[in-house]
Image (spheres, rainbow, N blue to C red):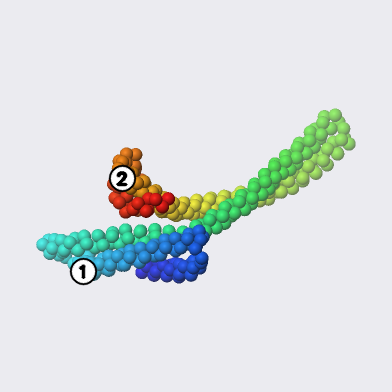
């Protein structure tokens, strides 16, 4: 019921907008006003179709509710814990199935009509819908770009800290190794003063290594935090990409519906022109050969086509005056 109410409110809003556009369209006859009038007529046609389809759908839904009201007690018996003998159970199930067939049929027909209503509402409001989709896609794309810039900054900083951590620890270890080597050489050559200086350097190097090791531990904590932040940013980037693609698909589906209607309109115009040509050739006593092979598919709802039979039928509605008014 909430969906029906929302659809009704949207319909009323669209009808109000149409009324406003009809008032605006009252202008001196020119190409702009002609297009505006045609647009208003198309919108009014869609609104009328929505009204008709909604009434038909509501009748099916009401019928389904009535069928279900009869089914509910039987359904409760079938699903309940009450012990039923075989004959009684068979009778209940038979009555239930008898009622369920028209119930399922009414629900299915209502669903088909609801699909047609949704299509027409989207066609009626496609400009507003497409503007919203375009804006949403632009917002998600901007979010993705901002997140990519943040990711690049985090990656750069992470590489710097990782490299610095390796270099600082390697430098401290090398200094300790160099001090130990100098001490060993001083001992080997009996250099007492050198031995004393090397020992002091070794102690200093050991302290520096301990400091570097602790600093390296803290750097690895920072590295782990940065890596975790990168994971989160990557998740947000993936989310932005998914949302963008989802909205893009919805927008393309809407564009497909609009293009299908535009194709059908162009095809109808082409059929009228072909019918007029057919009429001219018939009036001249000739026979139409090439247009007999014409087959134009109807896009959107159904799988109809327009062909030579309809061209022939349409040709009879054109008079000589119609043919001469090029």
Earlier-in-chain disc, 1 versus 2: 1
Counting from the top left corner in percent of width and height, residue 219 is at 68, 49
Determine if residue 253 is in view. Answer: no
**Quarter of the figure with residue 108:** bottom left
Counting from the top left corner in percent of width and height, residue 75 is at 22, 65
Determine if residue 149 is in view. Answer: yes
Residue drawn at x 70%, y 42% is 163
Describe residue 13's horizontal placement relative to residue 215 as left or right.
left
Name the secondary structure under disc 2: helix
- Given residues 98 and 130, the one toward you in this image is 130
Point out the residue furthest to the top here: 189
Quarter of the N terminus within the rendering: bottom left
Name the secondary structure under disc 1: helix
Residue drawn at x 79%, y 40% is 202
Counting from the top left corner in percent of width and height, residue 276 is at 36, 49
Figure check: 72 above or below 284: below
**Residue with the mark numbered 1:** 70
Q: Nearer the viewer, mark 1 or mark 2?
A: 2
Describe residue 131's horizontal placement relative to residue 58 as left or right.
right
**Quarter of the figure with residue 124:** bottom left
Counting from the top left corner in percent of width and height, residue 324 is at 39, 50
């Amino acid at each position: 019921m909430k969906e029906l109410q929302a659809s009704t409110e949207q319909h009323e809003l669209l009808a109000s907008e149409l009324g406003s556009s009809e008032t605006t369209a009252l202008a001196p006859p020119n190409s702009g006003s002609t297009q505006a009038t045609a647009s208003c007529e198309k919108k009014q046609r869609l609104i009328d179709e929505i009204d008709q389809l909604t009434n038909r759908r509501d009748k099916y839904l009401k019928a389904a509710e009535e069928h279900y009201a009869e089914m509910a007690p039987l359904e409760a018996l079938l699903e309940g814990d009450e012990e039923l003998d075989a004959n009684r159970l068979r009778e209940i199930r038979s009555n239930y199935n008898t009622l369920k067939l028209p119930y399922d049929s009414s629900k299915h027909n209502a669903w088909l009509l609801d699909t047609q209503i949704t299509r027409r509402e989207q066609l009626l409001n496609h400009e507003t819908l497409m503007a919203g989709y375009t804006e949403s896609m632009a917002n998600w794309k901007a979010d993705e770009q901002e997140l990519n810039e943040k990711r690049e900054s985090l990656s750069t900083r992470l590489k710097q800290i990782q490299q610095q951590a390796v270099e600082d620890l390697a430098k401290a270890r090398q200094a300790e190794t160099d001090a130990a080597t100098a001490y060993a050489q001083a001992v080997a050559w009996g250099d007492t003063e050198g031995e004393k200086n090397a020992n002091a350097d070794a102690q200093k190097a050991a302290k520096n290594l301990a400091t570097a090791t602790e600093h390296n531990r803290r750097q690895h904590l920072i590295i782990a935090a940065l890596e975790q932040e990168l994971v989160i940013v990557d998740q947000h980037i993936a989310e932005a990409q998914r949302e963008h693609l989802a909205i893009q698909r919805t927008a393309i589906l809407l564009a497909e519906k609009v293009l299908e209607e535009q194709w059908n309109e162009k095809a109808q115009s082409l059929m009228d022109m072909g019918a007029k040509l057919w009429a001219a050739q018939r009036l001249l006593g000739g026979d139409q050969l090439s247009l007999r092979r014409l087959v134009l598919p109807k896009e959107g709802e159904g799988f109809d086509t327009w062909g030579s039979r309809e061209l022939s039928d349409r040709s009879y509605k054109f008079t000589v005056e119609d043919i001469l008014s090029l």
